[in-house]
Amino acid sequence: MKAVAQALRAHARWRWWEFALLAVLLLSWLLLPGQSLLLNEIAILALFAVSLDLILGYAGIVSLGHAAFFGIGSYAAALFAKLVMPDPWVGMVVAIAVAAVLGALCSVLILRGSDLTRLMVTLGVASILYELANKLDWLTGGADGLQGVVMGPLRTPFGAFEFDLGGRTAYAYTLLVLIICVLVARRLVHSPFGTSLQALRDNRLRAASIGLSVNARLVVVYTVAAAIAGAAGGLLAQTTGFASLDVFDFHRSAEVMLVLVIGGTGYLYGGIFGAIVFKLLHDLISAWTPQYWNFWLGLFLVILVLVGREKLTRPWTWWKKS
Amino acid sequence: MLTLLFDGIAYGMLLFVLAVGLAVTLGLMNFINLAHGAFAMAGGYITVLLMNRLGVPFLATLPLAFLGTALIGALLEPLLYRRLYGKPHLDQVLFSIGIVFMAVTGVDFIIGSTQQNITLPAWLQGRFDISWIGIGKYRLFIIVVCAALAIGLQWMLANTRFGSQLRASVDDPRVAGGLGLNVNRIFLLTFAVGSGLAGLGGALGAEILGLDPSFPLKFMIYFLIVVSVGGTTTLTGPLLAALLLGIADVAGKYYVPKLGAFIVYTLMIVILLLRPQGLFARAGGGK
Amino acid sequence: MTTTVLETRGLLKRFGGITPTNDVSIQVEKGARRALIGPNGAGKTTLINLLTGVLEPTAGSIWLDGQDITQLAPHKRVRRGVVRTFQINQLFGELTPLQSLALAVSSHLGISGGWWKPLGSDARVAPACETLLAQFHLTDVMNQPVKHLAYGKRRLLEIATALACEPRVLLLDEPVAGVPEGERQEIFDIVNALPADVSVLLIEHDMDLVFNFASSVTVLVNGAVFAEGSVESISNDPRVKAVYLGEGEAAHG
């Protein structure tokens, strides 16, 4: 009896490296103030990738349009700050809510059909939003983007902090949102609900055959993933001060997928590791060949797939015959 | 209005030729090849370079565009694609995105990113005006060529041995292999021809659709729409889907230019929502 | 008087020009030990698919405890106690046997939607899992990903998963397919040990197992009910023998 109960508990227990990662994240804010802007970018990308992990790694849905939720969170936060009130917390809640609503609506689209259908539909939604943002230029600034988003101070129990040019406040804010979202997502994936997501990813037929409602779960996870992506988008708008069309771009959806794949899918932290590696690689290679970064990215993707995705996250298998 | 219809049909026929290779690849190898547009771009550039740098007449470049692209496809299939047939769709998506990125930046690097222009031969320029319809000569040419190709493909599928081998392999590759069909060779030929057709489409489309390194990404979604709405089990499905798409896009951009491609995307989503297996697919289609 | 738990009335399934289920009307009583036999292609698995809701019937109806469940979604039928196993293992490759069973148990308890507390935090889950793991000799592999398990263990898990749902009507589709001779009886012992009020419908080719286990038999041929009765009457029925021998099929697992 004990062994079984213990084994169940062991699945959800905090690993040492989870604590280590948390510590590293917090220390990075303390010890690298000069890098705050870059770290902020990484953290936003990480949050975006973690949200994709929920639907791709845990529920097995291949989406080429996840940027739709990132983008709508971005524009929602920017417009809210410009037109209603500049408080970052309230704006974040708005971004999350709007993205969640869109996610819930779009979740209906991914319930039926093959992988290709889902790919097309998710791509279609992101493309529609891109077109809308482009055409409704009286609201969104069109191709120029929404400029001049000035945020109010971040109100905390420790006082009100203005967003400084160096980005320290921004990074602290982003880190906080990232950590909260990851903690919530962590609870989610270790719960019966989270396990049932993996079950329906592995074998949808059997999941239904043990009494799980597949559609309801897909709707919920898609909505949650959209909400978190919206949070990431909101962070981008709030910490950089503008929102532009490229938040809906196909490149964003492809990029975040790659980030997640680099870090590894299905264990929740792949988005974070992937974002760190990706951004560092990006800066490295862009410094060397700024125009043709996409070429090396493409080459990397091709090689990655040919060699096998799992090999990347398990370097010890490089020498073993699988 | 009839002119719009005519233009839409021309556009649709072109999309069909461009996308038919993708439909067959998906139906046959169950491979989502997002890089299909890169082959089309290759064909377009072959034509442009032959015409502008070597002075080859337009009509002569067309078969060369077909052959050149088919050759590229015939090389890449056994080298790269074949290793990925059984892999999950995510891997295929990542792989083909990688190929597209490489192709796009490669072309940008070698040739540059400006729009490529060709001058059509004189007999293809201009239009006939018959009552209310303005029939562009070039668009008429496209319709004729693409229709001939479509009929030719259908004939080949239905009447030749290769055609029936292909249909058998699409239906069930394992059984086909068990029956002694050389499935690898069928895949290779099909992939090569499909790529070649895409290249030919790119060459034909250079004048109408424009040609620059962003071509594969710009039009990828259109090819995918043709395939997902038209299904992969017939030829007529993608043909009808392509025509529908062509007409809808041309009409949409004319009547409601503010909304642009919005109409096409929405239409696609609605269709896929109602019939996830595509408008024209046979019932009981698989992944 | 035995009560009918599961019933079909005129169940018909037609597609693409074939009729795998042809006007099937059967009644499964409470506590049944019913074998469903027939030559290959007789439509046995199709019937199971119809009963569980995986396939929609072209005509006819399905009744559970006197209620029409023909339109009921598959996962809801499971919640009402209609559970099946698959002829080809349908398992969750990346999960462990413990996780799979814990999930099935949680689903049965109605707590599979919980999203805050970890899997298995409910006190009822661990004991139920432990019993199943022990029963099916899976305790030593309970923490290994299912995709790494040997076939025999996976088959055991296949059935254990179904039992974790505490079925009232258990539909077994060739449960011992691919299991070595010596281990087959073990599985049947477990099924035999199910509570007497659980109804079991078993698709099986091995006649020895059928005779050992079943008390009644339904014979399907070409999608229709060919014969029904007790094990003795069916095994002595010359028409049934003719159907099997005529098809060139030896009555051997």
Image (tube, coloured by chain):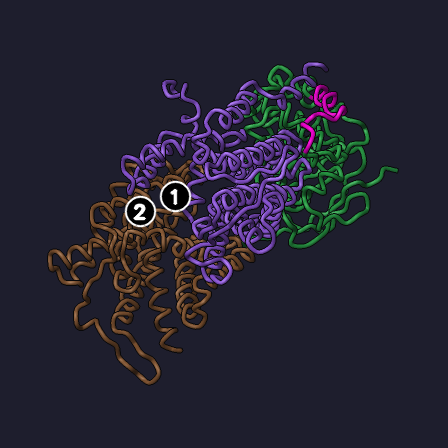
Chain colours: A purple, B brown, C green
Question: Which structural element holds mark 1?
Answer: helix
**Is B44 placed left or right of A137 in the picture?**
left
A270 in magenta: no
Mark 1 → mark 2, Cα distance in angstroms: 9 Å
- Residue C216 vertical placement versus A231 (above, below): above
Residue type for callout 1: Met
Q: Which mark is on residue B29?
A: 1
Residue extending farthest to the right is C1
C127 in magenta: yes
Sequence order check: which comes first, mark 1 or mark 2?
1
Label 2: chain?
A: B
Whether marks 1 and 2 lie on the same chain:
yes
Label 1: chain?
A: B
Q: Give the range drawn in magenta.
A: C116-132
**Is A316 placed left or right of C227 in the picture?**
left
State the image coordinates of residue C228 (x, y, percent, origin top left).
73, 40
Q: Name the residue under label 2.
A: B191
The N terminus of chain A - image quarter = top right
Q: Residue at x 52, y 48 (%)?
A: A150
Q: Do residues under tags 1 and 2 come within 8 Å of each other at their CB atoms?
A: yes
Mark 1 crowd level (few <14, some 14–19, many ≥20, 10 Å Cα): some
Residue type for callout 2: Phe
**Is C170 placed left or right of C155 in the picture?**
right
Is residue C8 visible in the rendered image? The answer is yes
Question: Which structural element holds mark 2?
Answer: helix
State the image coordinates of residue A133 (x, y, percent, origin top left).
48, 57
* Rendering quarter of residue A291: top left
